[in-house]
Amino acid sequence: MILGFAQQYPPDECERRLPDVAAARALLGERCAALDALFAQHRAALGGLVHNGPGQALLARSEDATVLAYARLALRHGRLGHDLHPYHNEGHALDLCGERLARLIAGVGVAALDLAGWCSLLLFGACHDLRQREAPAAIDGVGANERASWEECARILAACGFDPEREASLFIALELAIAGSTFDARPLPSQGALNAADLVHSGGALAARLEQVLDQRRAHWRSDPRIGAALPVALIAADLDTANVAEPFARFAEGGEALCREREMLAGRSLDEAASALPVLTFLGEGQCRFFFDLHRFNSPAGIATFGAGKAANAPRLKALNMGLRARIALEGPPRSGAQVLDAYRLTVEEVGGA
């Protein structure tokens, strides 16, 4: 495809178990209702963009692919399988495909993108975190999980009737968006390789540097209008992914806890053990502030317009949370476990308050 990575992530057991939309809907059962409700909401909001047969067919295929990706994520890393990731699961996909995308459509207006662009964002929400267990191996800044997720995403598109030539703009936008959702994987001082949860607290989103990646991997990309049209969609996608910074504060804090739990799980540390105390405190304290204030940036005008005010409102609350957590820990003495730090964190969130 556009970035030219060698194919190296074949289908796994989850993908073989759910080869198509019928199998996905059979697995999800009543859970399909939430997806169908958000599809109906988006169809109403997109209005005139879905006025003809081709437009209706494109959106229908996009909805099918979203269902298939959502089911695979729920089975592989979510609540329908045996490897639950506290943050990178089907709930995160539902947030992006549902509420955040709806906020974006309302915030910038339906005319901001064509139908393929909006479908690309819907599919990005469902597909960008499909794989979370690949061995770390970044190439030109693009992480292994992201490359594996894109390969599976392309297979999902094929299974749902998409054609890479006829719908090239959608394929290119998705490839760049999933690549751009990689966070800088360079280790922090004195740390080894970072896992998917760690990456949120390391470098910024690769989306801001996609042009440099394209310079390295596709020298004459600027002469391809399809890539030029896809880049803005990829930047918006990165903003959707990190718009947790603009969630109501209690929800943002819950997301921080979920990421922390996932990090400790992937590191093989029990939250009840003393070994988790300092990593959890660091992650929820200075790590969360570093992500919010130093590393996170909205990459698109649409992201700033839709989510910028929410992030600004959360900034003083996060500072208060960090100061309050440090004060509570200082008063109680060195924590004996990560679980104790999490208890202190939740109590401090309640004290800080704020919607």
Image (spheres, rainbow, N blue to C red):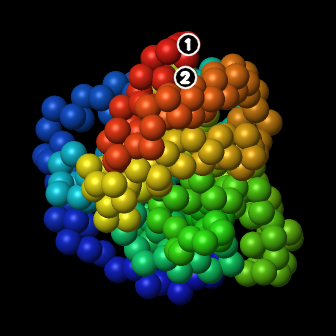
**Are dots 2 and 1 in contact, CB under 8 Å?**
yes
Q: In the rendered view, would you say 8 is above or below 85?
A: below
Instruction: Name the residue rendered at 47%, 84% in the picture.
Output: 7
The count of marks equals 2
Q: Quadrant of residue 173?
A: bottom right
Measured as percent of width and height from the top left, residue 144 is found at: 50, 74
- Amino acid tagged 2: Phe
- Amino acid tagged 1: Gly
Relative to 285, 129 lies left or right: left
Q: How far apart are the alpha carbons under marks 2 and 1?
A: 6 Å
> What is the number of the mark on residue 147?
none
Secondary structure under tag 1 reads loop
Q: Judge whether residue 59 can be spotted in this image.
A: no
Q: Nearer the viewer, residue 7 or 336?
A: 336
Secondary structure under tag 2 reads helix
Instruction: Name the residue rendered at 22%, 54% in the picture.
Output: 75
> What is the number of the mark on residue 249?
2
Measured as percent of width and height from the top left, residue 107 is found at: 68, 22
Residue with the mark numbered 1: 354
Label 2: few (<14), some (14–19) or many (≥20) C-alpha neighbours in 10 Å:
many
Measured as percent of width and height from the top left, residue 145 is found at: 47, 68
Ranked by sequence position, the earlier of labels 2 and 1 is 2
Q: Judge whether residue 199 can be spotted in this image.
A: yes
Q: Nearer the viewer, residue 24 or 354?
A: 354
Instruction: Name the residue rendered at 41%, 39% in the picture.
Output: 341
Q: Nearer the viewer, residue 17 or 160?
A: 17
Q: Nearer the viewer, residue 114 or 202?
A: 202
Label 1: few (<14), some (14–19) or many (≥20) C-alpha neighbours in 10 Å:
few
